[in-house]
Amino acid sequence: MRKIYLKKKVLDLRKGGYSYSDIQKMTGVSKSTLSGWLSGLEYRPNKIVQDRMIKARYFSSLAKTRIKNESILRANKEAKDEIGNYSDRELLFVGLGVYMGEGTKTKGVVRIINSDPKIIRLMISWFRDVFGIKINNLRLRMHIYPDINESVAMKYWSAQTGLKKEQFMKTQVDFRANKSLKNKGRLPYGTVQLSIKADGNKDWGVFLSRKILALMAEILK
């Protein structure tokens, strides 16, 4: 009789939306037995269980966020400690690595293209500190889409790089009708091409291109 009574109580509690853990606490029936008795019974958690699940997810999310943030802080600290203040020679290698991935490899042309202002600022430092390029000899050309305001984009890139508006070349606007819309809005200021105006300085023209390509070749040997 007791087993029949317990089973009925278990079924009623389950129909009332209680979890296995709740039912076990209320009746003392093991979870393995509950699994057999309640197999196939539709389960809809009641408000008490739902609230507890929401609360559990919330605290789980907080814990994951805390672990993530702690990992980020640790990674940032270790990166800062390991890099420290790098030398001009180290800057040379860092810039070469970036140029290998983002720079123009055409002979006689020195140009880096990117949408990240941090990368552009790094390469401005590379050209100035490693090769002695004057900031007034640097040029930017924006590549934007029709939905981007050219004036706003120019102000942005000027503020990010320290280059004056007079150092911007004619903007390229991409009017391709078949251009995918999936990236629309992802580059609100477009991309820029960072290049050098030699102004008659032979070391900053074709020779610089040859030197950069030669440095890359040495690295890749």
Image: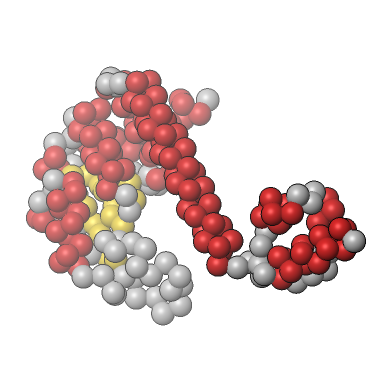
The answer to whether 10 appears left or right of 164 in the picture is: right
Which quadrant of the structure image shows residue 39? bottom right
Give the quadrant of residue 185: bottom left
In this rendering, the answer to whether 99 lies above or below 51 is above
Which residue is located at x 47 percent, y 38 percent? 67
Residue at x 15%, y 52% (from the top left corner): 158
Q: Which of 89 and 36 is in front in this view?
A: 36
Instruction: Determine the image quadrant of residue 96.
Output: top left
Q: Can residue 6 be seen in this view?
A: yes
The answer to whether residue 214 is seen in the rendering is no
Q: In this view, does 34 lie above or below 201?
A: below
Is 2 or 111 nearer to us in this picture?
2
Q: How is the image coloured?
A: secondary structure
Quadrant location, the N terminus: bottom right
Q: Please provide percent x and percent y for residue 108.
A: 33, 43
Q: How many marks?
A: 0
In the displayed structure, does residue 59 sit left or right of residue 188?
Answer: right
Q: Viewer-proximal residue, 103 or 200?
A: 103
Task: Tell me which residue sits at (59%, 61%) in the image.
Answer: 49
Q: Which residue, as the protein is rendered here, is positioned at the far front?
A: 1
Q: Nearer the viewer, residue 197 or 117?
A: 117
Q: Name the residue at the right extreme.
A: 1
x, y percentage for residue 100?
Answer: 43, 39
Residue 36 % position (x, y): 86, 58
> Residue 113, relative to residue 17: is it above or below?
above
**Looking at the image, is 85 positioned above or below residue 97?**
above
Q: Which residue is drawn at 29% across and 52% down?
A: 193
In the current view of this chain or complex, which residue is farthest to the bottom?
177
Q: In this view, does 148 lie to the left or right of 67?
A: left
Measured as percent of width and height from the top left, residue 221 is found at: 52, 25
